[in-house]
Image (cartoon, grey):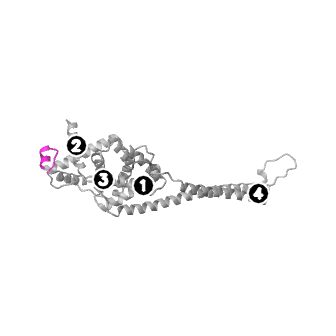
């Protein structure tokens, strides 16, 4: 609550063109934004370019932020749109994962693999997804955004998000089950 | 049954993805971003300062244009366009403006510009106080 009140003051100052106030907000949200963009973009240089673009767009558009939603949700919306459109411009290609990996949703198999291995495997599988789908997964599972928030971020209907998440989950299951064969 | 499986996969994915460490960009990233933000802020300031001036110039241009339009239209009106008036002795002429009237007009315009300048100067000085009193984060 206190943080939200403080943020409101920084947001108000940033709306007046105060770069230091905006930098304060940027430092607060940059790790979240950069992590998700880096995972989706896969290239560090691209991720830095996209993250910079996200914050420049946020600074230029902060006047239109009406505080009806959380600042983070508004920022994620910019991050999602920028990442997806930048990667499309770069003709981002995604390759389905075909490595060998000992992972399934079977508890015995899970127990036999180390956490690091599992995380690494999952990352590899997620790299095979298109940017918008990977973004959805990270928003839902990593940042624990609700379906409603994701719907606002991606400007898609709640039903669409549910269907997409289900489809991606199925896709992940297929990919992961291939690895256990 | 399906829900249970979905819940299991949800829990598994959430557990695995929460293990991912937060990434951070290279050292120079923040400096580069700050430079670009300052450029953008300067551009926005220039546009903000220019906008009222452009508005004033456009307003004056519209007024002048309207005056020119009326004058041209009045002088180019054909005799046939002018409605027939009863046979009286009319004396229609443009009002004449003395030098004093022009001086008053110029003075009003000058005062308006001075007012605009002072308002801009004051708005630059009056910035909202931040950070607010109390803890920061």
Instruction: Describe residue B59's horizontal placement relative to residue A174 as left or right.
Output: right
Sequence-first disc among 2 and 4: 2
Q: Secondary structure at mark 1?
A: helix
In the image, residue A103 lies in the stretch drawn in magenta: yes
Residue A22, horizontal then vertical, whole percent: 42, 55
- Using the image, determine if residue B27 lies above or below residue B134: below
On the image, numbered disc 1 is attached to which residue? A22
Q: Find the distance from the CA under tag 2 to the CA under tag 4.
A: 82 Å
Q: Find the distance from the CA under tag 1 to the CA under tag 2.
A: 36 Å
Q: Are marks 3 and 2 on the same chain?
A: no
On the image, numbered disc 4 is attached to which residue? B101
Query: Which quadrant holds the N terminus of chain B?
Result: top left
Residue B53, horizontal then vertical, whole percent: 60, 58
Residue in view at x 45 percent, y 61 percent:
B38
- Using the image, determine if residue B66 lies above or below residue A105: below
Q: Find the distance from the CA under tag 1 to the CA under tag 4.
A: 51 Å
Q: Secondary structure at mark 3?
A: helix
- Magenta stretch? A102-112
Q: Which residue is at the front of the view, A59 or A133?
A: A59
On the image, numbered disc 2 is attached to which residue? B11
State the count of labels.
4
User: Which chain letter matches label 4?
Assistant: B
Q: Quadrant of residue A26?
A: bottom left
């Amino acid at each position: 609550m206190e943080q939200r009140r403080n943020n409101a003051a920084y947001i108000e100052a940033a709306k007046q063109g105060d770069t230091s106030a905006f930098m304060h907000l940027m430092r607060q949200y940059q790790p979240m934004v950069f992590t998700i963009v880096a995972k989706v973009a896969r290239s560090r240089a691209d991720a830095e370019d996209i993250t910079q673009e996200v914050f420049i767009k946020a600074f230029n558009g902060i006047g239109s932020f009406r505080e009806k939603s959380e600042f983070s949700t508004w920022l994620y919306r910019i991050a999602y749109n920028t990442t997806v459109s930048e990667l499309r411009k770069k003709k981002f290609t995604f390759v389905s994962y075909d490595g060998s990996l000992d992972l399934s949703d079977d508890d015995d198999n899970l127990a036999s693999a180390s956490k690091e291995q599992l995380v690494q495997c999952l990352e590899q599988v997620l790299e095979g997804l298109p940017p918008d789908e990977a973004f959805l997964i990270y928003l839902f599972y990593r940042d624990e955004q609700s379906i409603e928030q994701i719907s606002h971020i991606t400007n898609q209907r709640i039903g669409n998000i549910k269907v997409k998440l289900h489809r991606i989950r199925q896709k992940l299951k297929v990919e992961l089950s291939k690895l256990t064969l | 049954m399906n829900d249970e499986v979905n819940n299991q996969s949800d829990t598994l994915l959430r557990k695995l993805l929460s293990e991912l460490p937060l990434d951070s960009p290279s050292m120079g990233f923040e400096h580069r971003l700050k430079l670009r933000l300052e450029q953008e802020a300067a551009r926005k300031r220039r546009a903000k300062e220019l906008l009222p001036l452009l508005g004033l110039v456009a307003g004056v241009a519209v007024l002048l244009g309207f005056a020119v339009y009326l004058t041209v239209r009045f002088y180019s009106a054909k005799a046939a366009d002018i409605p027939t008036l009863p046979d009286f002795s009319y004396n229609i002429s443009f009002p004449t403006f003395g030098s004093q009237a022009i001086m008053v007009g110029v003075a009003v315009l000058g005062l308006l510009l001075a007012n605009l300048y002072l308002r801009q100067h004051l708005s630059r000085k009056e910035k909202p106080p931040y950070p607010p009193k109390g803890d920061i984060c």
